[in-house]
Image (spheres, rainbow, N blue to C red):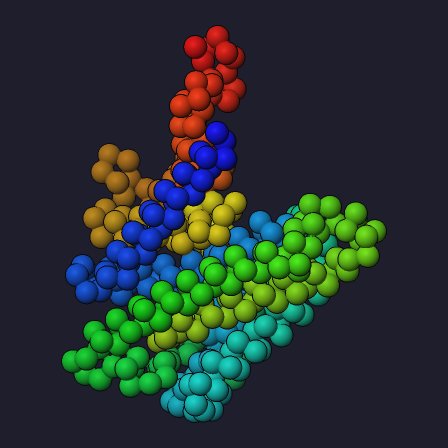
Amino acid sequence: MSFLGMTARTSVERTVALVVLLLVALWPLGFSTYYGHQILTQVFFIGIVAASVTFLSSYGGMVSFAQIALFGISGFVYGNVTTHDSKGLNLGLSPWLGIVLAIGITVVVGIVFGALASRSSGIYFLMITLTFAVIANLFFGSVTDVSGFGGISGINPPGVLLNGIGEHKSVAADALFYVALIAAIAIYVLIRYIVRTPFGIALQGVRDDPVRMASLGFNVPLHRTLAFGLGAFMAAIAGILFVWWNGHIDPASIDLGQNINALLIAVIGGLARIEGAWIGAFAFYAVSNVIQNSWPNGIPGIGGTFFTIIGLIFLGVVVVSPDGLLGLWTRYGSLERLRRRGAPPPGTTPEAGA
């Protein structure tokens, strides 16, 4: 009975996921191009950053504040390598070489970060990664040869299709939308694959009991370092998509507020499942868009800035469902199965359930 209920629930989830994916894929063709180009494209690449946070937290037991810093490193490297007439190094090299260098350098930096933090855990790990985030922000703000506080502008993606020409800018935005969508799907599939490999299973063992895993002969710091490197790879992809979408990057793009936003998005969506990263990103930017466009001075009768309102939403989600928005779905499914079986809800006595 339980197995059949679980199978039915999985089938429903897959159907819902396919319908949502189809609607998203068709969005630029039949719905608002503003929401497609400005909201959903942003959801895709910020969701990738949040997915890297979820991956490290859920499967490695590491809550990282450094993912936005790695995201920014990738964007700054790409900008320095490919631009001609902006701040930074202005190397003017091929965008394709810029992609390779951005990903490669970011992964190397991520591995170094991971190696330095790998022997710590809990609040100490979080504080070390927060230090990395602050160092990255101050480095790019202070070193004018690679950025300065003004940042790097005029960053373009490779290819005429993505760049767009004059009246065909909408074609470029559509192309970037689909590139970001495919990248998000690829990262999701990659994570689902990794966590089923021997490395992924061992990483989950490290998360649950690092002392026992070490006694069994597993190199705990190495597993954490490699996991951090994988998280850096994901953040690097998102960083490249960001500079393609925004055309500009500066230290404000990777400040402490942005790091908090990434963690907030992951928690709102649900740290227990990878899908929650994009659910949280959509909720975050949808609420942001509604508040800023409809209630720029706060909700009528309540007031408050965007951060006040999103903070209240975050508090409500955490109180109602500690596993985020996806946790509500899981909780509803569990209660529905109990109802069909005639069992009382959790936390109640049989008499109270009756």
For the C terminus, the quadrant is top left
Q: Position of residue 213 (x, y in %)?
A: 77, 51
- Residue 248: quarter of image: bottom left
Which residue does the image show at 62% across and 72% down from the upper left? 109
- Kindly give the residue lying farthest to the top in the view shown: 351
Q: Which of 172 and 317 lies nearest the eye of the viewer? A: 172
The percent position of residue 280, horizontal first and vertical second, equals: 40, 49
Left or right of 45? Residue 141 is: right
* Whole-percent x, y for residue 47 in the image: 42, 58
Query: Which residue is at 66% across, 60% downward?
Result: 199
Number of dots carrying numbers: 0
Q: Is 111 on the left-hand or right-hand side of 343?
A: right
* Residue 251 seen from this side: no
Residue name at image x 38 percent, y 89 percent: 85
Q: Position of residue 10 (x, y in %)?
A: 43, 43
Work out whether residue 292 or residue 344 is closer to the camera in this orientation and state it. 344
